[in-house]
Amino acid sequence: MPIYTRRSDDGQALTIQVEGRFDFSTHQAFRDAYEHNDPSVSEYIVDLSDTTYLDSSALGMLLLLRDHAGGDNARISIRNCNVDVRRILSISNFEQLFSIH
């Protein structure tokens, strides 16, 4: 359940990659991934290509990231979801709040 981060070459985009289960056990690591970064970050990319499971606490963590990034003005994209994860995001109407690819 590791969380990895990487910055874009220009430093303005932060990619947060979640590996394995995205649930309450990743709460602190996920928050640490974005809270302790340079304020010049203006875009967040959540890469779920290696995420096998997502629960309601993960949805809450995504909402906390959205608040941290500026709420309605936040630039956050969720990418590389498998079918099950995509279905959960869709049922939760997260396409209204995030750009999902």
Image (tube, grey):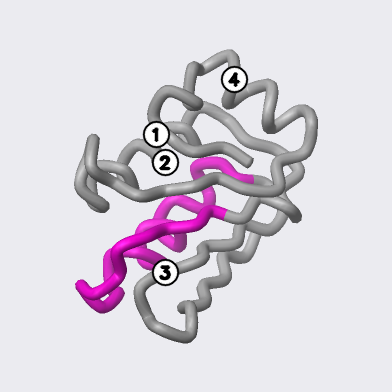
Q: Which of marks 4 and 1 is in front?
A: 4
Q: Which mark is residue 60?
A: 1
Name the residue located 59 percent from the left edge and 20 percent from the top edge: 90
Mark 4–mark 1 distance (CA, rounded to whole Å) = 15 Å
Q: In the picture shown, does residue 2 fall above or below 53?
A: below
Image coords of residue 21 (percent x, y): 67, 46
Q: Which of marks 3 and 1 is in front?
A: 3
Local crowd at mark 1 within 10 Å, few (<14), some, or many (≥20)?
some
Mark 2–mark 3 distance (CA, rounded to whole Å) = 16 Å
Inspect the image, locate mark 3, and give the three-letter code of the amino acid beneath it. Answer: Ala
Q: Looking at the image, tell me whether mark 2 or mark 3 is earlier in sequence order.
A: 3
Question: In terms of secondary structure, where does tag 2 sit?
Answer: helix
Residue pointed to by mark 3: 13
Name the residue located 49 percent from the left edge and 47 percent from the top edge: 77
Q: In the picture shown, does residue 43 fall above or below 64?
A: below
Question: In terms of secondary structure, where does tag 4 sit?
Answer: helix
Question: In terms of secondary structure, where does tag 3 sit?
Answer: strand
Residue pointed to by mark 2: 62
Image coords of residue 52 (percent x, y): 76, 43
Image coords of residue 37 (percent x, y): 30, 75
Mark 2–mark 1 distance (CA, rounded to whole Å) = 5 Å
Q: Nearer the viewer, mark 2 or mark 3?
A: 3
Local crowd at mark 2 within 10 Å, few (<14), some, or many (≥20)?
many
Q: Residue at the front extreme? A: 10
Q: Residue 94 carries which label?
A: none
Q: Looking at the image, tell me whether mark 3 or mark 1 is earlier in sequence order.
A: 3
Residues shaded magenta:
22-46
Q: Which mark is residue 90?
A: 4
Q: Looking at the image, tell me whether mark 2 or mark 4 is earlier in sequence order.
A: 2
Inspect the image, locate mark 2, and give the three-letter code of the amino acid beneath it. Answer: Leu
